[in-house]
Amino acid sequence: MPVESLIRKYFPYESFRRFQLEIAETIYDALASNKVALIEAPTGVGKTASALAAALAYSEESGKKVLFLVRTKNEAQAPIRELRRLREKGVDVEYVIIRNRPDMCCIASTRKLPYEEFLEECRFLRSSGKCPYYVNTKKVNIDEVMLETLESAGSMSEYTQLLCSLNVCPYEISREYLTRARVGIMTYYYVFSINKPETLNIKVEDSILIIDEAHNLPEAINNLNTVNLSLASVVASISEVRKLIDDEELRNRALKILKNLQAYMVRLSQALEEETVISLELGDVLQFFEDFQSIIDAYYEVLRKKRSAGVPIPYTPLSKVIEFHRAILSKASGFGIFLMRDGQGVSLSYRCIDPSIISSAILNNAGGTVLMSGTLPPKEYMVSMLGISKDVSEYRISFRDYIKPENYEVFVYDGVTTRYVERDEEEFSKIANVLSKVYHTYQVSKAILSIFPSYSVLKAVRKYLDPSVKYVMELGSTSIDDLIRDLRKDRKKLIMAVAGGKLVEGVEYRLGTENLLGLVIIVGVPYPEPNDYLEDLMEILAARLGDRRLAWELTYQWPAIVRVKQAVGRAFRSESDKAVIVLMDRRFREDRLSRVFRDYFGKYLIVNEEELLSKLASITPH
């Protein structure tokens, strides 16, 4: 069958929209010639349908399985939607969805447990035969169960609910069915995490990897392969050893290690400012783990005591100490040890610094690789960060290729900055003052999305906002569904979000076909704040590339550029969307940024405050 006919067979629609066939053909050709495909296409082009069509066409010829990998479980909805439409077209492609065990558990009380405790309880219920869903999974005809599920499930939640209603374990039956399904939909975790408690039988050499939102992949790999030990876990371990270890010698030996570790972390934390990282010497940390057998013995004694007391889930924070010790003993290349502070407190962190240590073997040995995103960094970035040695085939659709120039305006306001060394209360007050004026000047009944480089900057600006500004601030508890419901009642809101956060990445600000956003403001350049971890990454790249300037750009500049593009993309989810973009920082005038964004937008008007407000006041509702 000719290539285009084979692609059309697996395309879920009657005809291709603009760019879709070109994307599919680029991917198919790359897979057939053993190249890595890099695809950049704005949301709304339809790259998911094109990528699946090309991969399934190649899969029919090669016999390879297609693994569609997403960063978050919410991003899995797009491939599910396209595969369902393909089935409706009469082309049945067996697929399976894999989420983590808690998300796929049918026992409501169990899935609410913290992750480590859930795994302990799940393991116990399975091994003791006390989970009826797991027991039933071994008795049913898997093919029949999955056929019934795939006929009806329209979303990830429906998929899990249907399997639970059939009295089987969704996770176990999905894991089993993966061996015979043509498509597996799952998060990056199952392919790129090297120390995972949940494993699948995946042979990457027999798999085509479609990696969605691939601009996130380097950072995601580093995060997936990082092991943390929080000060809170050390303190909790001290408490448990004191309470539950009767053997005085064992108790004292274990407490000596834990107390010395606690004192070390407390002393170092005094050198940390908010949201900063300091590099440590591995040997300096390992010295606190001498006589570590006492911690292991204490761990088993605490579990024995809890079981004998009838504790249903005998979890202990000592497991975190043991996990961290096991990680640092590996002394793996491309890893480093740091002390970090975040919203949960201070932690020792054994972090992956160089993602290529993990990704290079996977991507270069896979049966096929597609890296796609609406904001894909340059080829040099992806190749260097991920250690790609195969030839690369690119297809990129720019913002200007997709969105007509009459549908957007771009203004650069240079009256403020969030440059780290210039941040002070006066600057935060200026930013808030301009935001307040913009809110009241902009007369279109649509939401304004403002993006800040960090949560600390967001909070510092918010306190100076005019009290009459109706705003929604990103919090840990903020739900995008609740926000959309709020905007349904009142469109005119200032949404205050963090670059790369949950109100920016992969979020649809729509009600049906209506675009809820009319104005996007990038408050400051969202450079990652310099710290020891990023400096170590830059040194690795500089040594690999032989170019410190390029290493700096890959470490700091391109992540910032991608975050700006991601934020702008929230307002343009189809070709017909219209919006205004304001880049609010004088650094957007500097050549290294203005060169990128002038080319990206094709228009770039630098304005003062009076000019900005005048331009916004002249915009009429559309």
Image (cartoon, rainbow, N blue to C red):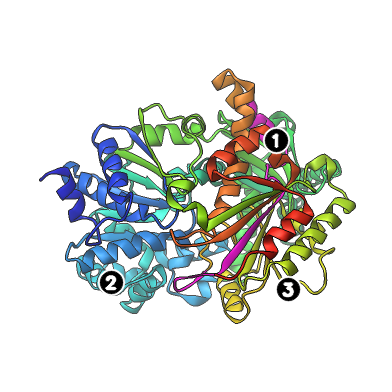
Depth check, mark 2 against mark 1: the one in front is 1
Q: Name the residue that disc number 3 marks.
A: 470
Quadrant location of the N terminus in the rendered image = top left
Which element type, helix, strand or loop, lies under badge 1?
loop
Q: Which residues are magenta?
A: 510-539
Left or right side of 484 for 575:
left
Query: What's the mark number on residue 149?
Result: 2
Q: Nearer the viewer, residue 51 or 147?
A: 51
| Residue at 76 percent of width and 71 percent of height | 469
Place residue 256 in its image quadrant. Answer: top right
* Circle 1 residues within 10 Å: few <14, some 14–19, many ≥20: few
Q: CA distance from mark 2 to mark 3?
A: 44 Å
User: Residue 477, position in %: x, y?
Assistant: 65, 69
Disc 2 and disc 1: Cα gap in Å? 55 Å
Task: Give the x, y percent position of residue 261.
Answer: 77, 43
- Amino acid on which the number 2 mark rests in the picture: Thr
Marked residue nearer the N-terminal end (2 or 1): 2
Query: Which disc, if any, is residue 590?
Result: 1
Q: Is residue 262 left or right of residue 290?
A: right
- Residue 241 appears in the rendering: no
Between tags 2 and 3, which lies in front? Answer: 3
Instruction: Work out whether 273 lies above or below 484.
Output: above
Looking at the picture, does residue 497 appear above or below residue 347?
A: below
The answer to whether mark 2 and mark 3 are in CB contact below 8 A is no
Q: Secondary structure at mark 3?
A: loop
In the image, 393: left or right of 405? left
